Amino acid sequence: MADYKQPCIHCGTLIDRDARFCPTCASSSPFGFLCPTCLRPIEKGQALCAGCGRPLYIICPVCGGRTFVQETCENCGTRLTIRCPNARCGVMQFYENTKCTACGKKIKDKYRVLTPSAPAAQNPPR
Ligand SMILES: [Zn+2]
Ligand SMILES: [Zn+2]
Ligand SMILES: [Zn+2]
Ligand SMILES: [Zn+2]
């Protein structure tokens, strides 16, 4: 294996090119953005995923701003990924995913909770 490292696009840590995860920020796509649903490579600016057709821009449920489907909200910095509830998997999943892209386990609504990065007003219960 060549001793060749590349910076993680999310946090800048130099990691092995063949790494599947960034050890610093736990991103599962350290060298490029991946569709959170079908894991196809995507680029900022694209409106829809060419693989599954999901929108690549969403409204952040925390700040209400429009953001690319990346690990953190472009506006408020809230992490938009949650850990797969399967203890033996634990792969970070986009919060909208209804099942884990790694192990296929269904992700129940109660796990799809985002923690705002900054102290913000509590969302009023609906
Ligand atoms: Zn990283
Ligand atoms: Zn897709
Ligand atoms: Zn936000
Ligand atoms: Zn999983």
Image (cartoon, grey):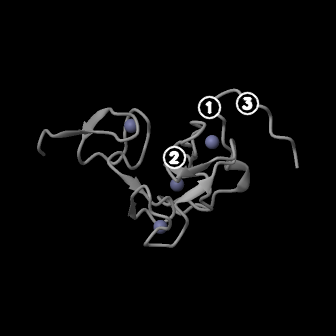
- Quadrant position of residue 27: top left
Asked whether the viewer can see residue 85, the reply is no
Q: Which residue is drawn at 69% across and 47% down?
A: 64
Q: Mark 1 points at which residue?
A: 117
* Front label number (1 vs 2): 1
83 sits left or right of 62 in the view: left
The amino acid marked with disc number 1 is Ser
Q: Can residue 57 be seen in this view?
A: yes
Q: Around disc 2, counting alpha carbons within 10 Å, would you say few (fewer than 14), some (14 to 19), or many (20 or more)?
A: some
Q: Tell me the element at label 2.
A: loop
Q: Of circles 2 and 3, which is in front? A: 3
54 displayed left or right of 31: right
Q: Residue at x 32, y 32 (%)?
A: 13
The answer to whether mark 2 and mark 3 are in CB contact below 8 A is no
Q: Where is residue 26 in the image (x, y as percent from the top left)?
A: 44, 39
Image: 73 above or below 45: above
Dot 1 and dot 3 residues touching (CB under 8 Å):
no
Cα separation between marks 1 and 2: 21 Å
Residue tagged 2 = 90
Query: Residue 86: percent from the left, percent from the top?
Result: 57, 51
Give the alpha-carbon distance from disc 1 to disc 3, as whole Å.
Answer: 8 Å
Q: Name the residue under label 3.
A: 120
Q: State whether label 2 is within 8 Å of ligand 4.
A: yes
Question: Would you say 25 lies left or right of 95 here?
Answer: left
Residue 42 numbered mark, or none: none
Which circle's residue, 2 or 3, is located before the other in the chain?
2
Q: Which residue is drawn at 35% across and 41% down?
A: 9
> How many numbered marks have been drawn onto this rendered protein structure?
3
Q: In which quarter of the image is ligand 3?
A: top right
